[in-house]
Image: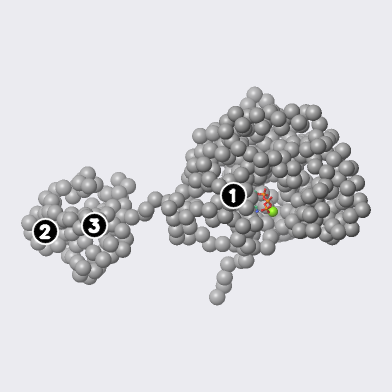
Amino acid sequence: MITSVRGFKDIYGKEAKIWKKLENIIREVFSTWGFEEVRLPILEKTELFQRSIGDTTDIVEKEMYTFIDKGNESVTMRPEGTASVIRFINEHKLYTLEKNLKLYYLGPMFRYERPQKGRLRQFHQAGVEFLGDLTPYAEFEVLSLMDCLLEKVGIKDRILYINNLGCPDCRKTYRNSLLKYLENNQDLCEDCNRRKITNPLRILDCKQEKCKEIIKSAPKILDFICVDCKKHMTKLKELLTLNNISYEIDPFIVRGLDYYIKTVFEVHAKGLGSQSAILAGGRYDNLSKDLGGYDLPAVGWAMGLERVVLLLDETFVEDDSLDFFFIYFDDRGEKIILPLINNLRKKGVKVSYDPSKSSLKSKLRKADKLKSKYVVILGDNEINNGTFTLKNMEKGEQFALPLDKLENLEKEI
Ligand code: ATP
Ligand code: MG
């Protein structure tokens, strides 16, 4: 038997219903906040991610699904959405100074990671990008959107962590101080020893326990950021407080992608074990320019849908019971019932029926199993009397009604 690929998951049944409702809420909230959807390709040129996420990040070094296509081009299944959004804006020349761009995406991403709870190789992200605004109001916009969305979805036990990575200028000073602190340290993992030369800031994001321990007492970037970056952060904090959005400062958040500057943030939820980040993002003012495009300040975040779904249960979705189940036994019944069913379904009423020759008892059992609220019975007696029986399954009551009432049956309940 052929099974699915490791880390790639089928979504079906109750879980699929949770996904559908979650996606509906996401789309609704995004659109209320003025974000427009962009549907981007799953495959991009490998270079796009090398140049945006960064050559020395875990994603690009270890996690990408990269292959050479039949035209001898190196392509990659997107590991995230932001690089593609920036590629898209520049390719189609969509930016004008008069107007901010507010875009969102929702779809599968691919990373070759070790599959575990809340970590897959194909996973899904819903993300927003707010482009064209250098001020902390941009962060405030996407963070208040985040707060509203998670509230609507019902994720109560969550914490927003914020940090500021500084601009390229203040980061240089910090980099030197960090390297100085790490200089005589022999205990870093092999990867981090390499990172000292390639990309020291990545060491702060190392998942190895011994590196984490060393990092705890390392100099903190917040002590190194310049006046402008400090002002930026103070204003953002003020805006969040004013709007009752709670947060904590976490000086160790650096994010796994190189393009972030100044503000970075993560939202963690209780109940997910070690994969507790459900949403993450930040500011990336230089990405577009670095990719040869517009000078386009930007802030964005992406939410991991698998992890959010893990926090939801069946009570999140409405009961999917039927409105009516139809029972009949012969051609006379069928001629009346089938066209009626068609009409009701066109009106959006949820109905089902059983065309088999089985007994009333067994058909009623079926109606019960399908959780039908009402049952319509059209047996010999009923047809001969010009009536039908309407049974309220919850109350167990039933009464006879004239056949012409079938026309607008949904009004009878
Ligand atoms: P992590 O530290 O958990 O690996 P990340 O920093 O790599 O996360 P981002 O690239 O910022 O994650 O992606 C944003 C969100 O997407 C994460 O907060 C998480 O909810 C989700 N996510 C990332 N990678 C995966 C994955 N492999 N499987 C499921 N969800 C994921
Ligand atoms: Mg990761």
Q: Say which element carries label 2.
A: helix
- Residue under numbered circle 2: 382
For this orientation, the residue located farthest to the top is: 98
Kindly identify the residue that appears in the image at 45 percent across and 51 percent down.
316
Give left or right: position of 33 versus 87.
Answer: left
Q: Position of residue 355 (x, y in %)?
A: 25, 64
For this orientation, the residue located farthest to the right is: 184
- Residue under numbered circle 1: 269
- Mark 3 to mark 1: distance in Å? 41 Å
- Residue under numbered circle 3: 393
Kindly identify the residue that appears in the image at 89 percent across and 42 percent down.
176
Earlier sequence position, callout 1 versus callout 2: 1
Q: Residues within 10 Å of mark 1 (few under 14, many from 20)?
A: many
Q: Amino acid at mark 2?
A: Glu
Q: Residues within 10 Å of mark 3 (few under 14, many from 20)?
A: some
Kindly identify the residue that appears in the image at 27 percent across and 54 percent down.
373
The response on whether ligand 1 sits within 8 Å of label 3 is no
Quarter of the image for the N terminus: give it. Answer: bottom right
The response on whether ligand 1 sits within 8 Å of label 1 is no
Give left or right: position of 203 versus 141.
Answer: right
**Residue 334 visible at all:** no
